Image (spheres, helix red, strand yellow):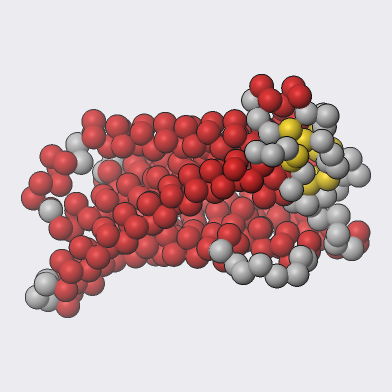
Amino acid sequence: MQGSNSSSVSEFILLGFSAFPHQLLPALYLLFLMMYLFTLLGNLLIMATVWHQRSLHVPMYLFLCALSISEILYTFAIIQRMLTDLLSTQHSIALLACASQMFFTFTFGFTHSFLLTIMGYDRYLAICHPLRYSVLMSPRGCGCLVAWSWVGGLVMGLVVTTAIFHLTFCGPNEVHHFFCHIPPLLELACGGNVSAVAMGVGLVCITDLLGCFVLILLSYAYIVATILRIPSAEGRHKAFSTCASHLTVVVVHYGFASIIYLKPKGPASPEGDTLMATTYTILTPFLSPIIFSLRNKELKMAMKRTFLSELCGEV
């Protein structure tokens, strides 16, 4: 990020929700705060359940714990600042703080996508190659897959942030978003290399995300083909039920992302764009622990055993 030294802009103004009526902001603050706290609580409950229940010490739930950690860190990188700005009159953020927020947002966001891909691969091995599953998904192998997911997210965060903040920002410094995101920052950059950087960063991000999505689709294509060959309806239902929660989260994750990033160009609406961005940064992390808790019967029963036993023990 050495190029930031040559920028005339030393801080940005995050406009975020400034286009909304002032009297609406406290209500939005309470809504987003409750969703954020529920996201934290849901992910912490999942992690605590997996930790206490030895029957859940299997790859699928260990990957789920790693996913919960990335989700907590992702929301922390964005929502803490957003909540502060909702009730504050000072919306400025230093250049270095903006770069740091972008780095952590993309690191945890891409880690999340890589972990979802690994979870799809895990379900593929469990259903399509059950006899070799314990060998292919050994504890060492699981640890390596999780580690590489975090390394991949770190590399993506570093590449994207370095590329953006090597640009020169000459002013104005008003960012039409509630966090330091690529498109609004590119609108403030100047110089002849802006379009090349924008194209390069976009290509890298789209290639990575589409690559993850295609791998998940391939995993489920083989899974569906294998499930359809199971003779009994009960066996097919049981096999598919182990994938239902993961598949639902994937649909929500990529569904909201495609709505935001692949929507056709049209007349700019700051309020509409801001609300649409909250679906991916707030609503998706909010729904994820709910889906895994309610759609996964084994995890739901384990939660009841863990926390009911704690309550009964206290009584």
Residue 168 locus on image (x, y percent):
74, 33
Q: Which residue is found at the position 20% from the left and 41% from the top?
A: 137
**Where is residue 210, by image quadrant?**
bottom left
Q: Position of residue 276 (x, y in %)?
A: 67, 63
In this image, 299 relative to 126: left or right? right
How many labels sit on residues? 0
Query: How far from the left and from the top, in percent, is residue 171?
Result: 84, 39
Does residue 250 appear to the left or right of 218 in the view shown?
Answer: right
- Residue 205 x, y percent position in the rendering: 50, 47
Q: Nearer the viewer, residue 36 or 215?
A: 215
Which quadrant holds the N terminus? Answer: top right
At x 41%, y 40%, the residue is 66
Is residue 81 visible to us here?
A: no
> In the rendered image of this protein, does residue 261 appear above or below residue 152?
below
Residue 284 can be seen in this image = yes
Query: Foreground residue, 166 or 141?
Result: 166
Relative depth, front residue between 41 and 111? 111
Question: Between 74 and 266, which is closer to the camera in this rendering?
Answer: 266
Q: Tell me what residue is drawn at x 26 percent, y 58 percent.
A: 219
Q: Is residue 135 above or below residue 33?
A: above
Q: Residue at x 57, y 51 (%)?
A: 39
The answer to whether residue 129 is left or right of residue 102 is left
